[in-house]
Image (cartoon, rainbow, N blue to C red):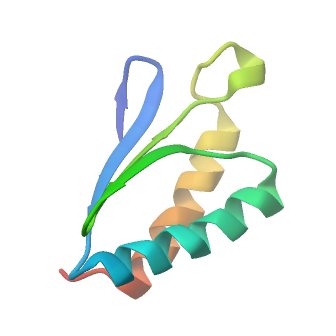
Amino acid sequence: MWQEIDDKFQRDFQFSDFKQAFAFMTEVAFHAEIQGHHPAWSNVYNHVFIALSTHDAGNIITEKDRTLAEAIDEVYKKYSVN
């Protein structure tokens, strides 16, 4: 689940391995590019952490973040190990 922490929309994602995590990040990158809204994220092996905020709105959560989060959730459904 996405959490609002320090004016960022944040979520951790876990995968079965690095290859799956990287494939997820690649697909998310295409959504981000289409939306013109890019996440701050990190990846260690099978774990991806994403934080969203809208820089041009003063680094707060906006509808852009919620829209990208919805797209990310849809991508995650394809890769989820749960």
Q: Quadrant of residue 78?
A: bottom left
Q: Is residue 23 left or right of residue 62?
A: left
Point out residue 62 in the picture as x, y percentages from the top left corner. Answer: 65, 31
Question: Toward the viewer: 65 or 47?
Answer: 47
Question: Toward the viewer: 32 or 18?
Answer: 18
User: Is 39 drawn above or below residue 53 in the view shown?
Assistant: below
Residue farthest toward the top in the current orientation of the protein: 58
Q: Is residue 79 left or right of residue 63?
A: left
Q: How many marks?
A: 0
Q: Quadrant of the C terminus?
A: bottom left
Residue pictured at 36% horizontal, 56% vertical: 43
Residue pictured at 44% horizontal, 74% vertical: 22
The answer to whether residue 59 is seen in the rendering is yes
Residue pictured at 34% horizontal, 47% vertical: 11
Residue farthest toward the bottom in the current orientation of the protein: 78
Point out residue 24 in the picture as x, y percentages from the top left corner. Answer: 47, 75
Question: Toward the viewer: 48 or 74?
Answer: 48
Point out residue 81 in the picture as x, y percentages from the top left corner. Answer: 21, 83
User: Is 10 drawn above or below residue 7 in the view shown?
Assistant: below
User: Is 53 drawn above or below residue 11 in the view shown?
Assistant: above
The answer to whether residue 2 is seen in the rendering is no
Q: Quadrant of residue 14?
A: bottom left
Point out residue 63 in the picture as x, y percentages from the top left corner. Answer: 67, 38
Residue pictured at 54% horizontal, 60% vertical: 70
Question: Toward the viewer: 45 or 67?
Answer: 45
